[in-house]
Image (spheres, rainbow, N blue to C red):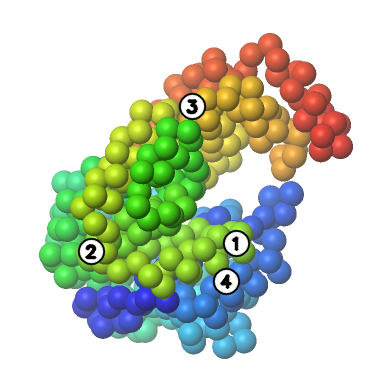
Amino acid sequence: MLYRTMPKNGDRLSILGFGCMRLPATPEGAIDEPRAIAQIRAAIDAGVNYVDTAWPYHAGASEPLLGKSLRDGYRERVKLATKLPSWLVTSRADMDRFLDAQLSRLETDHIDYYLVHALDGPLWDAVAAHGVADFLDAAKADGRIVNAGFSFHGLLPDFRRIVDAYPWIFCQIQYNYLDQQFQAGTEGLRYAAAKGLGVVVMEPLRGGMLARSAPAIAALWDEAGARREPVDWALRWVWNHPEVTLLLSGMNEEAHIAQNVAVAGQALPGALTDAETALVDRVAATYKELLRVGCTGCGYCMPCPMGVQIPKCFDAYNALHLSGDDESAKFRYVVSVGGVIGVDAPGFASRCVACGECLEKCPQHIEIPEVLKSVVAELEDEGVPARMEAASKMFKVRPQ
């Protein structure tokens, strides 16, 4: 495992952090606790020393699960990060209530890295008006938090002013080779680093999208002199930036953890050649031509009041355009959202009534109801009932 130093406090942190937003789940959708705990501990045993969660992850179940995972001496081996749910804050007192509840849920007396969650310009203005600076100062003074930071999902000008608004230790931004000019982007990364902030990167694989290939993408990777998996390329690209302190990977498969840890033992800043970075840029351009929606699968839009499985709909929609195999993509769609496995009832895009509840929740600012119309047009044809029947027989359950 390679490590980098948090600039303002000297903490030596693993370049790979464990993100607890996408933990392994049971068929019913609950966290698979024994497996998740084993995975988190295995990552720590492999050298990961930064774990990240938040109030809403897994509908509130992530923090308590992480608290259990860090029993038996594991808490002392990591820097623990969680986040103030800023959109739920309506007063200065709310902030203390959330933090105190999080300390209880996480079974700890302090949070090493505490973030004001999911900021954009208007949300920052709201929490600032409620006294977030005083809250952070007080929580640091009484020892409940050690380092203050923020995560960001807004526009670059707002990112700059938030960086300058408080003596932050670190920030967290979405960054990958598709998102070089999205939200904070490369310019924001460099701005924060120039101000002495550590930078934690989220979504280095764009919700797993960059772990997938397609014929056109695979052909490009084949041009490289070094033979690497798509995940390897994506992670190395982020770590190639010396301004990045660490990245978070939402690992929920044992093989993924082993793969990520292996790459994290090799990826030095500045190690990619000019030819390799140019190749990554060509891959990024090809992905952008193929992908139809920039969903990361974070699930913030859920639950939908009409039961639409929004992230799964978008995943199938992107898969349709990545694979070029229409029938396979349509079959995947009915399996993932049709009530065949993993959900109690069909979550087809056609159930959307454009209520707009999802729009204010989406950190990617996707026009969700409009994109769902395209999903319906391209994936819900007259063959849906036959695919549902075939999928139900395959998985030995009755169709809904």
In percent of width and height, residue 82 lies at: 44, 67
CA distance separating discs 2 and 1: 27 Å
The N terminus appears in which quarter of the rendering? bottom left
Dot 1 or dot 3, earlier in sequence: 1
The residue labelled by disc 2 is 270
Q: What residue type is labelled 4?
A: Ile
**Residues marked 3 and 2 touching at CB (< 8 Å):** no
**Residues marked 4 and 3 touching at CB (< 8 Å):** no
CA distance separating discs 4 and 1: 13 Å
Secondary element type, mark 2: loop
Secondary element type, mark 4: helix
Which residue corresponds to the image point at 54% horizontal and 65% vertical from the top-left? 257
CA distance separating discs 3 and 2: 33 Å
In percent of width and height, residue 53 lies at: 48, 64
Secondary element type, mark 1: helix
Classify mark 1: residues with Cα within 10 Å, few (<14), some (14-19) or many (20+): few
Dot 4 or dot 1, earlier in sequence: 4
In percent of width and height, residue 292 lies at: 42, 28
Dot 2 or dot 1, earlier in sequence: 1
Q: What residue type is labelled 2?
A: Gly
Closer-to-camera residue (339/226): 226
The residue labelled by disc 3 is 321
**Residues marked 1 and 3 touching at CB (< 8 Å):** no
Comparing marks 4 and 1, which lies closer to the viewer?
1
Secondary element type, mark 3: helix
Q: Residue 40 carries which label?
A: 4
Q: Which amino acid does label 3 sit on?
A: His
Comparing marks 3 and 2, which lies closer to the viewer?
2
CA distance separating discs 4 and 2: 29 Å
Q: Which mark is residue 255?
A: 1
